[in-house]
Amino acid sequence: MAVEPQVFDVLEFLIRARDRVVSRDELLAEVWHGRIVSEATLSSRVNAARTAIGDNGEQQRLIRTLPRKGVRFVGEVSEQADATIAPTVTAETPAASADLSIAVLPFNNMSADPEQDYFGDGIAEEIITALSRCSGLLVIARNSSFTYKNKPVDIREVGRTLGVNYVLEGSVRRAGERLRIIAQLIDARSGAHLWADRFDGDRSDVFDLQDRITACAVAAIEPTLRIAEIDRRKHSWPNKPDAYDLLLRASAHERDFTPDGMSAALGCLHQALALDPGYAPAMATTAYCHAQRHFQGWISQDGAHRSEGLAQAQRAVELAPNDPQVLWMAAFAIWNLADTQNGKDAAIELFSRSLAINPNSATALALAGWIETMRGQQAAGRALLERARRLNPLDPHGWFVCGALAIAAIIDGDYREAISWADKALVQNRRFAVALRALAVALVNVGEHERAAQVVEELLTIEPELTVSAFFARIPVPVASMAKTYATALKAAGLPE
């Protein structure tokens, strides 16, 4: 049976150490050689090992998880020598990882001031720590990546030696009391530059500058890596994909943001969960796709998407309670799909937990800001949304932030600002129903009824069966004044009652 190398290594190590419970740290040391990986990555490999030998996370007949202790292989094992099997030769250099993997090199000091060495090292260490909080991202530990300090490097060779697919490098330069930091993200296989940025600040505020650089770098790097990995794999999808490949395929379809794309994404996710029933990231992404279809109106009338989305979101949180991406995806799904106040409260708590673990996720900040705004807490919502924009001004999902800021402006009664934000969102994504609805409402309130009617016509091409009553039945609006504004304006713009 074909399995990923890491899955095989997990299985082999658990069998070899079957006389005792193996801790999480032991698995990381043995299989990942000290690299920092998320709980979700570790869980997915253990679950894949179970699947390969006919076990699963519920029965645990062969691989058993002992809460707060570790994992143990409990099946019967017999050893047999076979002289026909040739000895295995282990290479000293690890193969490139099949996972989303990165090494952060120490930042070069381009100044005559040796003190900047410490500053550059500190930035790299902070980025390593922050990146390790990103779900599904394998980050090489400092002790390994810092062996390249003050040495000329070939990025491709670094990738091969450390077994990573991406490398972040940078430099620090001082001019008087000013510091300039440059960082760049490179594909270690092709040598292509994926992202670069420059940061300037005053030497007297080095710690604040260090924090700002770390936050902005991590917010930009995480989505850039995921998009690069999806695009790379598109050209070489295996005929028999594993659960991770199917998750990436689903992400590629979800990015299309069309009814067909969402359906294709869900098809991939269902296949992934058939291969690995305990794969929490696939569960959370399934719930997230159902939530996006929900507010876009791309759903069947029987409401089956609600029950599946909520079940997958809740199960994902149970399996990966410390995975920040799982948490914000589940939170967004629960907020949109739950029809009780307890559900809404749970979503807010999950967002808080996700941001406590990874405060530099622009997507989590944007979605949390949207929910705060929908609750009528537009000041808190706007603060989260603006932080998301500052951290990653080129976020490929920036249209969501603009749409949420349009809603905040409508609640404040600033309809001209709402029109501006809605237009910005629609320039990036013309199919975004949230922004179209906000634009129609704002246009009516400034007297531009003809354009508002055109926007409603466009909205009906996305959701032909949309009516005012159907909209409120599907998407309750907790703020009474906002609900009244929307109902009155959408009717005036020509949306059927």
Image: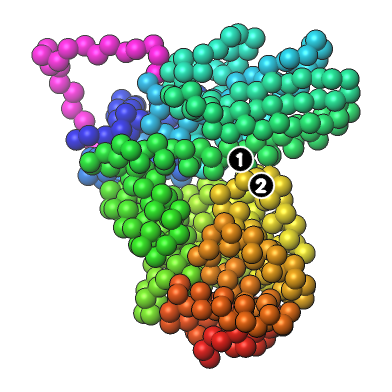
Marks 2/1 in contact by CB < 8 Å: the verdict is: no
Q: Amino acid at mark 1?
A: Ala
Residue 452 is marked as none
Q: Amino acid at mark 2?
A: Pro
Residue 285 percent location from the top left of the image:
44, 55
At horizontal 22% and vertical 44% (from top left) the residue drawn is 54
Q: Nearer the viewer, residue 19 or 7?
A: 7
Residue 102 percent location from the top left of the image:
51, 29
**Mark 1: few/some/many CA within 10 Å (<14, 14-19, 20+):** many
Residue annotated with mark 1: 220
Residue annotated with mark 2: 393
Element on which disc 1 rests: helix
At horizontal 12% and vertical 12% (from top left) the residue drawn is 83
At horizontal 62% and vertical 88% (from top left) the residue drawn is 492
Element on which disc 2 rests: loop
- Image: magenta residue range: 73-94
